[in-house]
Amino acid sequence: MNYNAAELKAMCLPASGDTPLACHFPESGTDNAPLHYAFKITHSNVNDLSVYAESRRLMFDSELSGAAVNSGSQVLSFTVNTRQPDGQPIQHDTYEGLPGATLWLPNGLDGIENIEVTPVTPIQQVFVIGDSTVCDQNPQWDKPAMNRFSGWGQVLPAYFNDTVSIVNYADSGEGTEAFNTLDGELLKPIANQLTRNDVVLIQLGHNDKKTPQNVYEQRLEDLIHFIRSRDAQPILISPMIRNHGIALEKQHQWPQLDIPAALAGIAKRENVPYIDLLTLSNRWAAPLGQAKAQAYFVSKDRTHTNEAGARVFADLIIDAIKQQDLPLAQALR
């Protein structure tokens, strides 16, 4: 479907307070099954533009996604994964969204000449497994930007071209149990969709402090084996720091579980790509100091980032993907 400027003006909900203009596009199916939509937005100025979808997922940002340098109308494109609810899959939330696809446009309709929406089967899906530091948090437009909880998986789509659809099944409070291969509630929907050449980013550990080390390691190894059995590609990621001012060597270490050692061991045994976000985020935070680093976390919260912090951690992950020359780097903008 193509929507011109006049049609968009008639169908989109105007901005209200801090809530940006929203355009809702009806779903193409009838059973609320996960779907993917390719968007092409013809715009006269993409040099200062941001576009969000669904539960405030960042789909395009001129700073992150690469601003155009040519004059005149240009087309920006991305692929949106839709599901019900829009955000966290099992966490009860006041915001569930609507069937179909929703775009949030902080810049309004100024400069938008046309939006084309097409249901597609993406060339590659990138599934995201994790917790509240990773998930698609609800929009929270009513809060100041610095206090909007934002997972790094929520901003990840802005880094990738339209061949990739980011499918984020991270959920608050969850750990390896929810993604175990025997009866993991959150692994089931992933298993129903995972196909050849897909990628699965795995960051689990924040909520596993009561999990014995042998159980933690076995669950992750089983998960890696399952992903590979589908001819998909797992990538392990360690949890980022918490801004407690605690030394790196003491972060994510519990009496019965040493998460950094466990993940490094699994990566070596299974020969799986490993992004040590714990070390990378510590290198970022240490020079800033705890007080300045707190600007990237929600106020009075030492664990959960705002969108600025989510971008920092996503940047670190993307840089590691490039530096390790992982195949996924080919799909970056």
Image: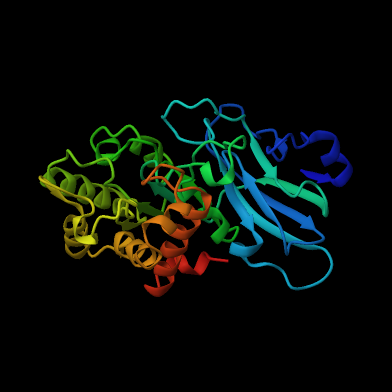
Asked if 22 appears above or below 302 in the picture, the reply is: above
Identify which residue, 87 or 127, lies in the foreground: 87
- Locate residue 93 relative to residue 324 in the image: left or right: right
Asked if 171 appears above or below 244 in the picture, the reply is: above
- Specify whether residue 322 is in view: yes
Q: Residue at x 71, y 38 (%)?
A: 22
Identify which residue, 166 or 280, lies in the foreground: 280
- Specify whether residue 197 is in view: no
- Locate residue 99 relative to residue 117 in the image: left or right: left
Q: Quadrant of residue 75?
A: bottom right
The percent coordinates of residue 245 (x first, y second) are 29, 55
The percent coordinates of residue 194 (x first, y second) are 41, 46
Q: Quadrant of the N terminus?
A: top right
Q: Quadrant of residue 91?
A: top left
Q: Residue at x 54, y 61 (%)?
A: 159
The percent coordinates of residue 168 (x first, y second) are 46, 44
Identify which residue, 24 or 150, lies in the foreground: 150
Identify which residue, 232 or 13, lies in the foreground: 13
**How did the renderer colour the structure?**
rainbow
Q: Quadrant of residue 264?
A: bottom left
